[in-house]
Amino acid sequence: MQFLKKNYEKILLAVIVLAALGVVLYLGILVSNERKRLDDLTSQVVTTRPKTFPALNLKEYQDLLARAQSRVSLDFSSSNRIFNPVRWQMDVHGHIFRNPAGREIEKLEVTKLSPLYFIVSLESVSGSPPDYGIGQTHEGALLQNRRAKKISYAPLNVTTNGFTVVSAEGPEEEPTSVTVELSEPEQKITISKDQPFKRVEGFTVDLFYQPENRHFTNRRVGDTILFASEYYKIIDIKESEIVLLQQSNQKQWIKTFSLTNSTSAIPPAL
């Protein structure tokens, strides 16, 4: 007991040192085992097959791309009623009828077509050497004051007011016929007092709009007519069509017709 009392500190220290050595040895063995386990894991070959991903469904995006690349045609003239509301009107009898914009031209009828002539006539002969009185009438002139007959006097081979008298047949004071050369267009014609020259230079038309029972008689280029609450200016008249200019939007409309529904065939220039 005396020995233990005197040396217990040394004994305790020796026990602690032995325990520490044991722990160090154990840790060394533990580290060695763990390193071996890790080496075994890294040396193994992984044979597990990876899970495949499902195929991507791109149909929706492909359809959108195809729609973006395709041309889209929008009808804003007939079937669309947001931008083109249907117009309804009342006729002279108080009946309401459907009259879409643009259809009023279809209801406009040409009932008569009459020719307007450029006329060259021999009016008089006077003097010696004679002066020939040549009358010119432009029935198709736009201005009314230019439609009346205009008489110009000229001797042979003198050009005036777009014509030249080049020869005369018969007695000097009373020729049976006179040959005249026109400047525009360049043309030679033969006239006498009872046989003038005529050439069609325009037309007048009679029109009828049945929904409103409106008649427009003897209308010519430049005239304005009112039907279906719209003003239209006549800008051209031909043997088979009339061209109208809608005043509200400056749109041109072409109304075609047949001469069988109008006057008889237009005679040729005389």
Image (tube, rainbow, N blue to C red):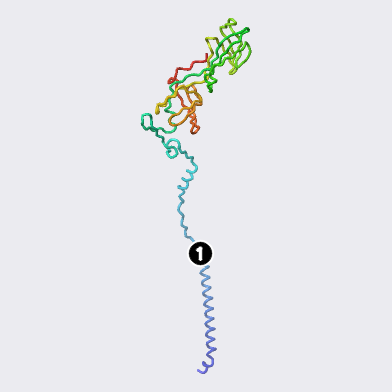
Residue visible at 54% across and 89% down in the picture: 9
- Of residue 105 and residue 77, the one placed in the foreground of this image is 105
Numbered marks: total: 1
Q: Where is residue 116 in the image (x, y as percent from the top left)?
A: 50, 19
**Circle 1: element type:** loop
Q: Position of residue 171 (x, y in %)?
A: 58, 4
Looking at the picture, does residue 5 appear above or below residue 194? Answer: below
Displayed quadrant of residue 154: top right
Residue visible at 41% across and 35% down in the picture: 87
Outermost residue, top side: 171
* Disc 1 residue type (three-letter): Gln
Residue visible at 52% across and 87% down in the picture: 12
Q: Where is residue 78 in the image (x, y as percent from the top left)?
A: 43, 35
**Residue density around tag 1, few if under 14, some if 14–19, many if 20 or more, within 10 Å:** few
Side of 159 where 6 appears, left or right = left
Q: Position of residue 93 (x, y in %)?
A: 36, 29
Looking at the picture, does residue 51 appear above or below residue 171? Answer: below
Side of 10 where 216 appears, left or right = left
- Of residue 58 and residue 104, the one placed in the foreground of this image is 104
- Of residue 130 and residue 35, the one placed in the foreground of this image is 130
Looking at the picture, does residue 90 appear above or below residue 48? Answer: above
Displayed quadrant of residue 143: top right
Residue at label 1? Answer: 44
Residue visible at 47% across and 30% down in the picture: 231
